[in-house]
Image (cartoon, helix red, strand yellow):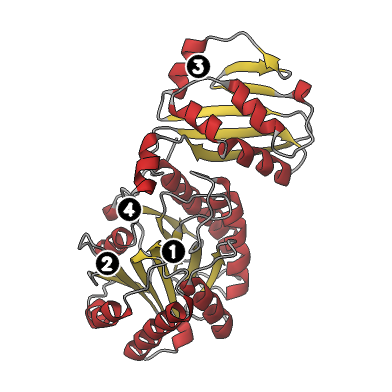
Amino acid sequence: MIESPQPIEQIELPLGFSFSSVVAGIKASGRPDLALVECSPGTQAAAVFTTNRVVAAPVEVGRASLKASGGAIRAVVVNSGNANCATGREGLRACRQICQQTARMLSVAATEVFPSSTGIIGVPLPVGKIMTALPDLLSARSATKEAAGQFARTIMTTDTRPKLASALIRGRREAFRILGVAKGSGMIHPKLATMLVYLFTDVSATAAPLRSLLRHACDETFNCISVDGDTSTNDTVLLMASGKSGATLRDRAVAKSFRSALLEVCHSLAQQIVSDGEGIQHVVRLSIDSARDRNEAMQLARAIAHSPLVKTAWAGADPNWGRILAACGNSGVALDPARVNIFIGDQKVCSNGQAFKFDKEKAHQHLAGRTCDIRVQVGRGRKNLCFYTTDLTAEYVRINADYST
């Protein structure tokens, strides 16, 4: 079942973070487009970034700042409506200028201010508008659920709804919380996506274990989703730990609970992103069974999930299993077609690489649902993988054909 955003009043708000949002005039719509998170002293962070060789200025600056600060972080500044990518030296200069001014206003080091941007590529960042808006942004910060919810709305671009998930974990001595806020709708590919994800927790931890836990969580969740197969230039997943709960990852029981809760929150956010994919009608749970290893299973999943022929068949709820089989054969995996079985819902539609009698109307009805299941058995090993993807519709084409105009 695809997750829905957690209602604002039900989220668990970790201690040690405050949020604010303002209208800086970046978006033509006039909606809020500049957001801030202030982190309490002692907060540590780890991040995972896009694998695209073309990276936005805030990715370069944020990566360097985390390295320079040893993971110390005191603020996050996010703008939506402009990616600040392919903007050259001026884009880097603008990003650093915003971080430096925010740092001065908060009396912290510039390397402790982490930048993010999302929006259109190749357009100069309106740094003057952002600098003008910073005083109001800082004066508006508040450690409330409502402010966190507004932060989630401010970072949206083509998203139709904010994406939040949280968890409360009660330990033997102290309780701690995790809150996740995400944006992402298109350019979603399993090497991260046009995706910004901010994860907040009040456990105490240093950057090294946070980095390890974050990489594991991303591999199991955000790297197992795809909308359109494109990898963005701005992808960032940032995990911040304030230490304000009193719980520490040095406690094995806390570390075990934290790992599980982090996976739960990231899994919810990943599913919310896929469910809000641009122009989608159907979310597909794609199961790859009996692959040799995880890499092979991912290779097969991506080949199927990124095939325009497969995705358009799903858009029409067409049980055309031959397109799935062809995508498997074109994946680069040295599979034996005579060992491949394909299922739509609970029906086998392909047996040992050949047609298998099935109820086409029942299969059509299953594919016509909001969420549907496709399972591919390749008979090469014991590794199974669940991968979430979508169909490809005319509405997706319209959204992206008109994006910059």
Q: Nearer the viewer, mark 2 or mark 1?
A: 1
Residue 235 percent location from the top left of the image: 50, 61
Q: What amino acid is found at the position of numbered circle 4 in the picture?
A: Pro
Among numbered discs 1 and 4, the one appearing first in the sequence: 4
Which residue is at a point 57% across and 85% down the rendered structure image? 68
Q: What amino acid is found at the position of numbered circle 3 in the picture?
A: Ala
What is the quadrant of residue 197 in the picture? bottom left
Among numbered discs 4 and 3, the one appearing first in the sequence: 4
Helix, strand, or loop for circle 1? Answer: strand
Helix, strand, or loop for circle 2? Answer: loop
Q: For mark 4, does the 10 Å Cα neighbourhood hold few (<14), some (14 to 19), or many (20 or more) residues?
A: many
Tell me how far mark 2 sits from mark 1, CA to CA: 16 Å
Residue 236 percent location from the top left of the image: 50, 64
Mark 1 and mark 3 residues within 8 Å of each other at the beta carbon = no
The residue that disc 3 covers is: 363
The residue that disc 2 covers is: 144
Residue 9 percent location from the top left of the image: 26, 54
Tell me how far mark 4 sits from mark 2, CA to CA: 16 Å
Side of 357 relative to 383 (left or right): left
Q: Nearer the viewer, mark 3 or mark 2?
A: 3
